Amino acid sequence: MRPCPHTHMHILNVHEFSKTFTIHAINREVPAFTNVSFHLQPGELLVARGANGVGKSSLLRCLYRTYLPSAGHAIYQAQQGTVDLARAAEVDIALLRRNEIGYVSQFLRPRPRVSAIELVMEPLLLAGVPADDARMRAGDWLSRLGLKAAIWPAYPSTFSGGEQQKINLARALIAPRRLLLLDEPNAALDPGARAALRERLSVLKSEGVAMIGVFHHIEDVRDLVDSEVKIANSQ
Amino acid sequence: MTLADLAHPRQDYSYGFLDAFARRELRRRILKAIAIPGYQVPYASRELPIARGWGTGGLQATLSVVGPQDVVKVIDQGADDSVNAANLRRFIARMTGVETTTDTTKATIIQSRHRIPEERMDKGQLLVLQVPDPEPLRHVQPDSSQAREMHADADYAQMWLSLYEQLVRFGRFMQGASYPVIVNGRYLMSPSPIPRWDTPALHQSAHLTILSAGREKRLYAVPPYTDVRPIEFSDVFFQVEDQAGRVCTLTGAGQKYMDELPQPSGESRFRISDTGYVEKLLKMAQGESTKIGPTYYDDAGQFWMPGVIK
Amino acid sequence: MLRPYGIRYDMTPTYFDPPRLTADRPLLTAWGLRKTYGRVTAVSGVDLEVYPGETLGIVGESGSGKSTVLRMLNLEEPANAGDYRLNLAAYAGENLLGLDRYRRRELRVTQIGIVYQQPHMGLRMRVSSGGNVAERLIMAGERSFATLRTAARDSLAESEFPLDRLDDPPRLLSGGMQQRVQLAKAIAMRPALLLLDEPTTGLDVSIQALVLDTLLRLRRERRIATVVVSHDLGVIRTLADRVLVMRGGQVVEHGLADQVLDDPQHPYTQQLVHAKL
């Protein structure tokens, strides 16, 4: 696939994107994905597919720059300008993470002595939302995902995997984003929460949020998916 | 004509005991100290026929500046007649032939330990204070080379920190004698262990004050008409010792700095600490003629210069 | 400041673009920092930038030079060479390493706060906690007792210090409390730069979590540019936006905190990350 000529339409344009891990201790190169190209428009949900073990999550992480891409480009149309996520300055990536790009992972990293609701409020507080407002919106999110108000002030380190993931989802989806990277967001969720998530993604889509997802339960979101990209590595 | 007629009369000591070289060195140090108010000038403290710590610093300053026309008064804790003061006075007189007095207004040089007289010193007079420890930063910075750096930087924050701590712990400033002062807006200075009562007397005074520590080999000065401000907060002020209600048993006077004399009954009686002043009050009471100069504090306890004590 | 953006560290294979979206200029810019003790080179040519509101982590083993870098940034350790600037009006265009002692003191009092691993390095252990904090304001020239008292109380409250212990000296406090007093002292003057040297090392895990939480809240509320030095990767992951990895006095890798910890590039960093229990 060649870069699309109408890049102004696209929020993201990924071209020959590759990631290879170099493990120095055993002197090995481990490819995650090779030569991935696609583009994405506002409001589009793109699903990454591929066999188990190919780097679907790694692709998302490379776009979020948790992993450093090895080759290729990911041209992102930010509100203030155009950057290549593969090589943008670290401060720019940090800025995009605060304001535009969200990452919804499977795993919550609970912090000791930080309550569930405080974790969810945090992105809003970072974006400058007043604490009262942030608390209200966080509570709204948690209840929609089916987390009882009684446990909001508790520390999530003791929660079940599903509960932790709900908190993580709320945390990732609460602040407005232009691009969401969904890394198996529904893997450990109960049916009610999965429905709530699907509902939320549908709203975000209609609001013009571009999304790239890797889904465990693809059937949940099948009718929301606009396009697919096949991920493979050269191994 | 014999050889003895031609020779100078024999003298055992130089005038004023110190040799010419020592006098010259001390005078230069004193000039430097006057030029940099409050700054501690090191000097070579000479051996004297009294022990270090018994006023040798003050004595050397006095001996280096005294001349035949001077009139010298020596006091110790306000008293002209204490053993130490009497010894020093006799020594100075013997070595210089100067006239001595107990009258503050008549003296040209007053060497003192721990007090400034109650009568106001005037221009042309010299006050020499004996200093045991010249370093006001000692208790916040025991390392003297670091203390010197703090002086160089005018970094006196720790002094205010210790005032803060005193207010927090005790609700008032605890420093009694040698209450630290800032001289001429620059150097922090220990005014020797004079009571707080005497500290304001140094501010914008007409007389020159030389403070000299013989054991520590440092001297410093407050030139006439120089600002001397006790350290204080802008909202919690330096206070002098309250003399209200204390009446001198000898003179019946009040509002002067009193010595407390504990009685067997457990009560205390008070006596004005400045014996030269007491002497004059007693003379006057007996109808003898005497001239009492204006005092630093009036009979209502008001300091003579307004605005100095807040 | 004639310097290409993005120093290429030998072992980091990627060149990054200059910032395009970030409008801020770095608050702190330092390059070529160098420190030798006799024949031993502690820090050899370290470059770093910190943006307003950003937290930069420096990781490395003992002896990697990370704490020396922090002390140089605090101007308490003279550098042998280098250029260090803070984007503050009063110090515009000046290499801070060349400040005279008066302005150095002024800068340290008003614009830089530091928390040391060892409380006794940052605190007077026999002076009341409030007094320790008030000292900063006294140094800056504040002479009103009421103001000092209020400011000390406010600053200690902000670092979540129990105010009923306001007048207790740090020597009577626990390690976590001592760090809170240090923190209150560090932020009392609302500095532009906060330096944290192993701020939670040596504390119990649960106390450590509480102190980290306070630091996170302050970072969020105050937007102080922060440099945190730690050998504890958990602390770095929690606090830092970006990370420098130091070894033998040099930076071997730099990157976003999660990238350095999750996808380390340099062999040394890989070893460091995987050595974590």
Image (spheres, coloured by chain):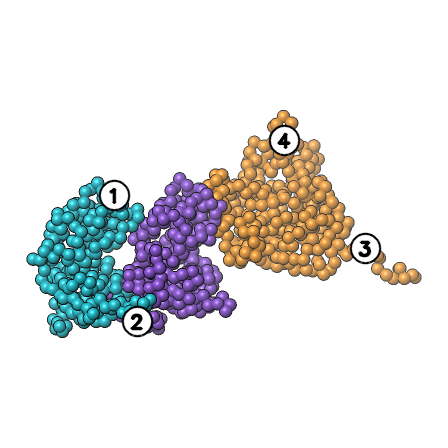
Q: What's under tag 1, amino acid-wise?
A: Pro
Q: Image quadrant of residue C273?
A: bottom left
Q: Which residue is mark 4?
A: B262
Q: Which residue is mark 1?
A: A153
Q: What's under tag 2, amino acid-wise?
A: Pro
Output the chain of dot 2.
Answer: C
Q: Indicate which disc residue B12 carries.
A: 3
Residue C195's place in the image compared with C41, above or below, is: above
Quarter of the image with the N terminus of chain B is bottom right
Q: What's under tag 4, amino acid-wise?
A: Pro
Q: Are marks 3 and 2 in contact (CB under 8 Å)?
A: no
Front disc: 1 or 2: 2
Q: Indicate which disc residue B16 carries.
A: none
Q: Which residue is mark 2?
A: C13
**Mark 1 residue element:** loop
Chain appearing in cyan on the rendered image: A
Chain appearing in purple on the rendered image: C
